[in-house]
Image (cartoon, helix red, strand yellow):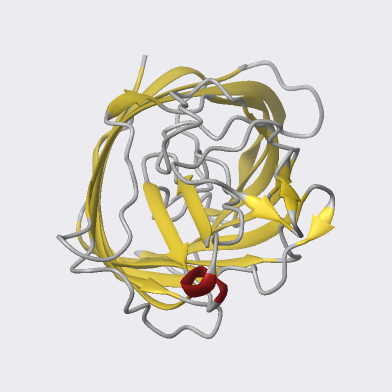
Amino acid sequence: MKTLLSSTLSLLVVAISFTAEAASGPPPPSVNEPAGINLGSTSFYDGFTGPTGLSHLVYLRYDQASSFRDSNGHENKQFDNPKISVATLLNQFSYYSPQEIWKGAHLGWNLIVPIVSLDGDFGDAGPKLKDNGVGLGDIVAGPQMVFDPLVDEHGRPVLANRIALDVILPTGKYDKHRDLNQGSNFYSFNPYWASTWLPAPRWELSWRLYYLYNFKNRDPASSSIQVFEGGPVRDTQAGQAAWANFSASYEVIPNLSVGISGYYFKQLDEDQVNGQRLADSREKVLGIGPGLFWRISTAEGFWFNTYREVSAENRNQNDFSVQVRFAHAF
């Protein structure tokens, strides 16, 4: 069995895939991607950071999954009416200095603190996974560099960029005897580049490109006995990954834009157990859906996004996700 427990900045998703080995003996070890990855939590106008100084962003998200996919993308039938619901409240504090250090570049930092509620229901028959209730998720922190928007000959902003070097810290609630945890119990390096392009008045295209490197988990969690190649599981390491959040919108009335946003996640190499490769463990998923952005003022903004996932492999496939986000600059 491969179990993924990961979250966006406000999303925690749980992925399970069983192999034929699970039917004849102990399942393969579980390997967790970090709780703290951003799958679709950011969308429209993502390259813009707002006024200099301190900003506070609040995210509230709900996700529900009832379909679990194997390495071929086929639905796993071993669960009896599975349902996993995840609610996340996230507070983000972002700062960048008004002082320019080089050609429109400003230094800053991010701090992201999630609270996560997990509720797993696996019916009366078949395998069951234990969740860890409500608790603190893994904190994300790191420096960022914000660039002044590029403007055209009319003074209209046309391109905005930001680079961040985030680290996911193993601060979340973690029980080695539970399958579904808020925390990952290992460090991850998770840099990104966010950009927004305004090709014409009222039109917007945004993207955020991520890379993820995970360090070892030296105390893996599972509610069942885990063995690998006939011996005990000493450590695990989730594979490297890359993904993109993307969006496109049109300003239908002043300060209100509607559009579509999504994310595509792909694991680049296999997970490892005791330093050895775990075959057929790479994950991928595509999520997409409609949303809107309301520019309340120069210091405040509101986002609403919904997603449905397709083409999942080695993970759950969310039936739906709903998120609201509010930003306020002090």
Q: Quadrant of residue 215?
A: top right
Q: Position of residue 229 (x, y in %)?
A: 76, 60
Q: Is residue 174 left or right of residue 68?
A: right
Q: Position of residue 124 (x, y in %)?
A: 15, 60
Toward the viewer: 104 or 107?
Answer: 107
Q: Position of residue 145 (x, y in %)?
A: 69, 32
Toward the viewer: 263 or 36?
Answer: 36
Q: Is residue 304 left or right of residue 200?
A: left
Quadrant in the picture for the C terminus:
top left
Q: Residue at x 47, y 68 (%)?
A: 17
Q: Is residue 83 left or right of residue 286?
A: left
Asked if 323 appears above or below 314 in the picture, the reply is: above
Q: Position of residue 119 (x, y in %)?
A: 22, 43
Q: Is residue 284 visible?
A: yes
Q: Residue at x 53, y 49 (%)?
A: 155
Q: Quadrant of residue 65?
A: bottom left
Asked if 205 appears above or below 236 in the picture, the reply is: below
Q: Residue at x 66, y 33 (%)?
A: 166
Asked if 120 appears above or below 207 in the picture, the reply is: above
Q: Is residue 211 left or right of residue 114?
A: right
Q: Residue at x 23, y 63 (%)?
A: 82
